[in-house]
Image (spheres, rainbow, N blue to C red):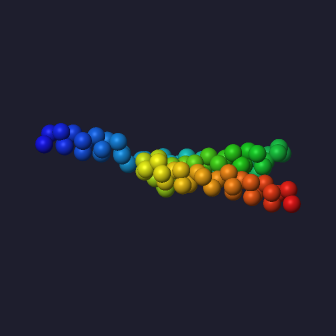
Amino acid sequence: MEHTEEKVQAHVEEHKRPNYFLVFLALAALTLAEVGVTFLNIPQIPILAALASAKIVLVAMFYMHLKTDSKWFTYIFLVPIPFVVLIIASLLVY
């Protein structure tokens, strides 16, 4: 019986609930950084793309639970990304 309780406790510790408030603050900070970049006289697209990518990763990891769920969900999410990048690149060239 103790072995089962230890397994349950290990499972609970493994899947701790993320601190959603910190994730929210990180997303808000990234959004403020994006707004700030728009006021600078520098090439904005690479910086904005990097900031948007960071926000995508945070949302996918925490709000979509890809960090703690089965790795299959992560693979299902990641496989189409190269195709999306190719489609967007081809539309930008056109």
Asked whether residue 33 is in view, the answer is no
Quadrant for residue 46, please give it: top right
Q: Position of residue 71 (x, y in %)?
A: 47, 48
Asked whether residue 14 is in view, the answer is yes
- Name the residue located 36 percent from the left edge and 46 percent from the top edge: 15
| Mark count | 0
- Name the residue located 21 percent from the left edge and 39 percent from the top edge: 6
For the residue pair 36 and 23, the one nearer the viewer reads as 23
* Quadrant of the drawing holding the C terminus: bottom right
Q: Position of residue 40 (x, y in %)?
A: 79, 46
- Name the residue located 79 percent from the left edge and 48 percent from the top edge: 44
Q: Position of residue 33 (x, y in %)?
A: 67, 47
Outermost residue toward the left? 1
* Quadrant of the drawing holding the N terminus: top left
Quadrant for residue 84, please give it: bottom right
- Name the residue located 43 percent from the left edge and 50 percent from the top edge: 70
Q: Position of residue 8 (x, y in %)?
A: 24, 45
For the residue pair 90 and 65, the one nearer the viewer reads as 90
Q: Is 82 left or right of 78, judged from the image as shown? A: right
Q: Is 93 left or right of 11, judged from the image as shown? A: right
63 in relation to 9, above or below: below
Q: Is 82 left or right of 17, judged from the image as shown? A: right
Q: Is 84 left or right of 94, judged from the image as shown? A: left
11 in relation to 63, above or below: above
